[in-house]
């Protein structure tokens, strides 16, 4: 997965879809005070476990996540 410019939530949704998970758009926006809508530039991961890819994407923005009922929700730590 590679993106020159994309929102955090779009990237997480794409990751989730690759392993048959869903992404909670409204819950993530609510839990992160909108930070999930920030854009990232030149993000790339290849053959990386989901946990590592999410850490690489979320940590610089001080975000974390939870997976419940096959759905990823972003949140503040």
Image: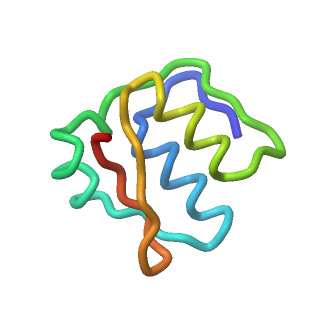
Q: How many labels does the image show?
A: 0
Relative to residue 4, is residue 17 depicted above or below? below
Q: Where is residue 33 in the image (x, y as percent from the top left)?
A: 16, 39
Q: How is the image coloured?
A: rainbow
The residue shown at (61%, 26%) is 43
Q: Which residue lies furthest to the right in this view?
A: 47
Q: Horizontal placement of 11 versus 61: left or right?
A: right
The residue shown at (66%, 52%) is 50
Q: Horizontal placement of 46 versus 7: left or right?
A: right
Q: Residue furthest top?
A: 41
The residue shown at (16%, 51%) is 30
* Quarter of the view holding residue 38: top left
Most foreground residue, 66 or 6: 66
The residue shown at (64%, 41%) is 53
**Which image quarter is the N terminus in?**
top right
Q: Residue furthest front?
A: 77
Q: Position of residue 4 (x, y in %)?
A: 58, 22
Most foreground residue, 14 or 49: 49
Q: Horizontal placement of 16 versus 63: left or right?
A: right
Relative to residue 27, is residue 35 depicted above or below? above
* Quarter of the view holding residue 77: top left
Q: Where is residue 69 in the image (x, y as percent from the top left)?
A: 44, 80
Q: Where is residue 12 in the image (x, y as percent from the top left)?
A: 50, 49
Q: Residue furthest bottom?
A: 69
Relative to residue 64, is residue 42 depicted above or below? above
């Amino acid at each position: 997965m590679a993106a020159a410019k994309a929102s955090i939530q779009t990237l997480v949704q794409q990751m989730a879809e690759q392993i048959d998970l869903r992404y909670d758009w409204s819950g993530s926006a609510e839990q992160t005070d909108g930070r999930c809508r920030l854009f990232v530039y030149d993000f790339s991961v290849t053959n990386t476990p989901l946990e590592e890819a999410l850490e690489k994407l979320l940590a610089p923005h001080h975000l974390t996540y939870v997976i419940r009922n096959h759905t990823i929700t972003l949140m503040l730590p």
